[in-house]
Image: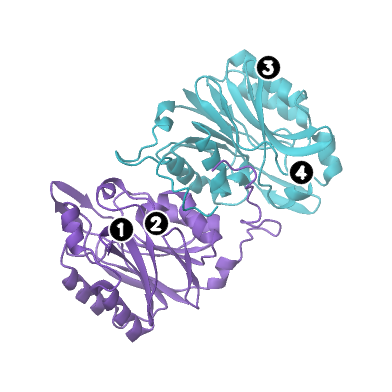
Chain colours: A cyan, B purple
């Protein structure tokens, strides 16, 4: 199976222009699954809820349509972060689309910092979608910080965690191998780069998108700055072997009788 | 507060000799808490249950007595791994002893590989002990692999996780910063080094004991080989600030309504 990320720097607010650019970058992609960053079409630093409301889309919007078209043309599945407006309620979401259109969505469970003033906390939970070649779970950016996110997806059967991100802290890229190892799953963190300065706020995004194996290996890394499409070959079955030793099984060994969670 | 580890290589089966050596290494220690490796008095590779039964001790044994004496002499608390025999039942345990003697014990929850043929799975769960200067939680070696261990201790109020280990895989030392970061706690992983060859089995231990901060920083590292006592100064209060940003709190932000654990 071929999986990858498209590290991409959107131009804030120019959704149509960003989508055209992304469709161009992906039009000849040879992969089964490619992950794009969080909020890849809009950018990140919304001045306020009104601005966000005007840029957000529902599942019939231009973002879903564009990605579905590219998926249909290329045979590839995509996971991509977008600003979702569901009957006037705003979520920081990711969509999974394939050659036949929308497969599922995920709404960010753990909102980071000022996102709490813009978005509602996600209500979808950690679901897994079978796309044939693999079972896909989604989480978004800061969700990684909570080990329960990747654990919930792994326990629900995910082989691969698709992880759109807009990372500004330096930790995630070196921490993702631990998420891979402790759950014996693949993960694809698609980060953005560049910076945004809006409404008195300023943020620099850290690039270095990363694909991690169930053995905690870093299989691919994007550059610190600049757009980058990377695709690698993986053996999905490795994620279904939960035994780090002959006598240990990462899920069966869990002591749910003792945990205080 | 001063915390540290004693990285130590036991001579297999020579409990009295190992205890004398450790007492000598610690007799002038200037610290509030020092962690010793898993099974530091016995060694690791027991040929069978009979051999283990003969070397294991209860809480009135020589190991507890020796450490209590050193604690009383130095004013330091110790966490140390030992083979525990409780009315004929064997556990891979850790004791916390202080100037007034035994404070508490922990029995390893997640047994590694052949340990399953020797020890019973721990039944104490993840408890926290207040020693005045800080609240101490214990976990042992392979427990680290399960994020639920450190999480349970942190949620129970631990400031510092004392983590005796006999590590043979290469992952733990680079993963502990993630455990520190995701829970905003200190951890002290006291590993052994050297190797053992017994009963057709052979194991090499990886040293590099490590102290980690609530910000995921590596504060001290032992050598790959050789005994080493290291003590550092920390600010315990840092472990009580669970807010990575003004609007985020690592525990209050948990989405227990969504997790599938």
Answer with mark 3 or mark 4, whichever residue precedes in sequence: 3
Answer with mark 2 or mark 1, whichever residue precedes in sequence: 1
> Marks 1 and 3: which is nearer the front?
1
Residue that label 2 marks: B123
> The disc numbered 1 marks a residue on which chain?
B
Residue that label 4 marks: A119
Residue A104 location, quadrant:
top right
> Marks 2 and 3: which is nearer the front?
2
Residue at the image position 72 percent from the left and 30 percent from the top = A18
Residue that label 3 marks: A69
Cα distance between the residues tagged 2 and 4: 43 Å
> The disc numbered 4 marks a residue on which chain?
A
Q: Position of residue B96 (x, y in %)?
A: 38, 71
Cα distance between the residues tagged 2 and 3: 55 Å
Q: Position of residue B260 (x, y in %)?
A: 57, 40
Local SS, label 4 = loop
> The disc numbered 3 marks a residue on which chain?
A
Residue that label 1 marks: B91
In the image, B43 versus A94, the foreground residue is: B43
Q: In the rendered image, is residue B158 in sight?
A: yes
**Residue B17, disc:** none
> The disc numbered 2 marks a residue on which chain?
B
Q: Are marks 3 and 4 in contact (CB under 8 Å)?
A: no
Near mark 1 (Cα within 10 A), the count class, few <14, some 14-19 or many ≥20, is many
Work out whether disc 2 and disc 1 sit on a shared chain: yes
Q: Position of residue A81 (x, y in %)?
A: 67, 34
Cα distance between the residues tagged 1 and 3: 59 Å
């Amino acid at each position: 199976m071929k999986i990858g990320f498209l590290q991409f720097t959107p131009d804030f607010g120019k959704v149509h222009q960003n989508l055209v650019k992304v469709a161009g970058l992906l039009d000849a992609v040879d992969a089964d699954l490619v992950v794009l960053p969080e909020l890849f079409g809009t950018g990140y630093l919304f001045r306020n809820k009104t601005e966000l409301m005007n840029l957000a889309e529902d599942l019939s919007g231009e973002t879903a349509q564009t990605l579905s078209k590219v998926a249909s043309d290329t045979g590839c599945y995509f996971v991509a972060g977008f600003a979702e407006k569901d009957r006037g309620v705003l979520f920081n979401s990711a969509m999974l689309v394939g050659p036949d259109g929308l497969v599922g969505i995920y709404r960010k469970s753990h909102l980071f910092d000022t996102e709490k003033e813009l978005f509602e906390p996600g209500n979808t939970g950690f679901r897994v979608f079978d796309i044939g070649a693999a079972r896909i779970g989604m989480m978004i950016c800061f969700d990684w910080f909570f080990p329960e996110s990747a654990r919930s997806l792994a326990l629900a059967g995910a082989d691969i965690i698709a992880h759109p991100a807009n990372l500004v802290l330096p930790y995630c890229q070196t921490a993702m191998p631990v998420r891979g190892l402790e759950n014996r799953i693949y993960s694809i963190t698609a980060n953005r780069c560049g910076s945004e300065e809006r409404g008195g706020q300023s943020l620099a995004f850290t690039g270095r998108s990363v694909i991690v194996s169930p053995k905690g290996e870093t299989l691919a890394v994007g550059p610190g700055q600049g757009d980058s499409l990377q695709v690698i070959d993986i053996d999905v079955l490795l994620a279904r072997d939960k035994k780090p030793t002959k006598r240990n099984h990462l899920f069966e060994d869990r002591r749910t009788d003792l945990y205080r969670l």
